[in-house]
Amino acid sequence: MTQVVDVTAFGADSSGVKDSTPAVVDAIAHACDLSGPVRLLFPRGTYQLYPEHAIEREFYISNTVGADPSHRHKRFAFLLEDLADLTVDGDGSTFQLHGLLGLFAVVRSERVTISNFAFDHSAPKVVDVTVAETGPAYRVLSIPPGNPYLVADDQLTFLGETSPATGTPYWRHSTDELWYCQIHDPAAQRTWRGDNPLFTDVARLTDLGDHRIRVDYLSEITTEDAGLVYQLREPTRDTAAGFIWESSQVTVTQLKAGYLHGFGIVGQLSTDITVTGNEFHADRSIGRSTAAFADILQLSGVRGAVTITGNLFDGAHDDPINVHGTYLEVVDVAGEQAGLRYMHHETAGFPQFHPGDVVEFVDKLTMVGVGQATVTAVDGPTGTDSSKPLTTMTITLDRAVPETVEPGEYVVENVTYTPAVRIAGNTFRNIPTRGVLLTTRGPSVIEHNVFDGMSMASIYVSADAHQWYESGPVRDLVVRGNQFLRPATPVIWFDPTNQVEGEPVHRGVRIEDNEFRLTGDGEVLRAKSVAGLVFTGNRVVGGEPAYSITGCPDVTVE
């Protein structure tokens, strides 16, 4: 029988007046003491959640700030550790998040569901600046009402909201610091990366009130960007909006996410993750168009089944879905031991292997595996403290490292954590990057999705041991029944980073019964180093399709 823990019984305020975080902490602690299934209930209402009373933990999260010590401590509104059979049921409520606060962390837990609520941040660190008016040598800019700012000495500074504990803003950044820019066209429903021209050659800044700022320029040119939204931020991914680590059977469903702070939802070294029926979409009525500080879903080292169905992905600042593992570079070899290093500065601090995991050594030049072994011991970072080096580790294997493996020339992938993936029935729009990045050897299907106006490849498959170090090869991938509307080309791109042609990196790919609606001539498919590639039964309208196929044996295109 499911036991219900009502957060209002612990003092949570459903009227949205006071901070409910202390009551949520107490209610979760009580739920952890109960046996059997538990429903953590938020009776329908509005709940304010602040970081000051949230529990702080030292966590290291893939694709965020790496080993940067200034952001090693994280706070989440719902910290769910070492528990089982828990459902967080929002009952249709709204959660208003404040400060640099993540929404949830599921750590060393199983059978957890996060469901049925809307949430947003009061002052997002991405500031959506709309050009409300243009004229000779000036623009009038409109700022969303939730983003405070200061105009002084012809300088504009954006602020976080004021902390009730310190009386100072949670963050502050000048326009020089907000150098990362995306441009959103609400009329055309397109978003792309570009330069920020708003604060170049400024003669004068004037606060007109009502969240409107006049910018006068030294140049007399009248710009033609009225109505466009410049989405501005600095690049630090200080936390994740949702964090799933060393957990299994976690479901995220029926959420309406107005803004994902820091990063998206990260699944890390976990098993069986389901994300279904959610809307990732900013509140356009208050001038916002950004729904995520970076990626929306980042599944880094997951095993079992990944299921992503029936979601709306609208307004990310990076890829909506990225499913991958992590290549670690070999830095030392001694018999059955291999010294390894995290290579990208945004990923570090957590263990990448467990005893019993199977690993594969991969030649960086060819991106082909040269041998597998089973891990018997690991000496490296813990993921929860800095007691050991954060970027290096040593693994011991059940056999000697292959003789061909040389430090600096090979990487290692955790083969055990390569999931089967189903991505189906989702809609992607207002995306400045790729729609889906996928590199896993588990059987995968991408079907019946709508990709509208992607600014890069709608589907991108790499296996990268030179830049992001995101692993690994595809072995069984079906792409079928999707609509690619107004796509950038190439629409589907296989782009492993092998420098030498040899044995194909990817294999077993079928692309069938999709519809490509081009806005002009362009590449529908670009494929490198894929064996057994079948492209058949697809419909292409609106332009002349092109195909670029390199180093791909056994190809069928018809």
Image (cartoon, rainbow, N blue to C red):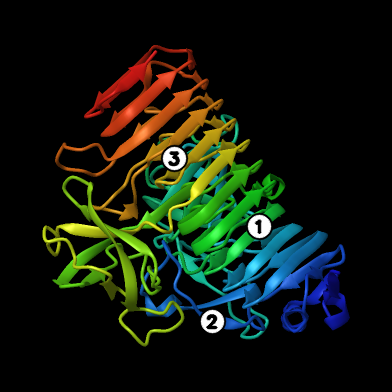
User: Where 299 falls versus 446 (above or below)?
Assistant: below
Going by the numbered disc 1, the residue's amino acid type is Thr
Whether 180 is drawn above or below 395: the answer is above
Residue type indicated by callout 2: Arg
Which residue ends up furthest to the front in the rendered image? 399
Tell me which residue sits at (61%, 38%) in the image. Answer: 426
- Asked whether 389 or 368 is in front, the reply is 368
- Answer with left or right where residue 443 lies relative to residue 49: left
Q: Residue at x 39, y 56 (%)?
A: 325
Q: Quick one: label 1 or label 3, which is nearer the N terminus?
A: 1
Residue 57 tag number: 2
* Mark toward the viewer: 1 or 3: 1
Query: Where is the C terminus found, in terms of image quarters?
Result: top left
The answer to which of marks 2 and 1 sits earlier in the sequence is 2
Residue 19 visible to an observer of this rendering? yes
Q: Nearer the viewer, residue 387 or 529?
A: 529
Q: Give the crowd class for mark 1: few <14, some 14-19, many >=20 residues within 10 Å.
A: some
Q: Quadrant of residue 185?
A: top right
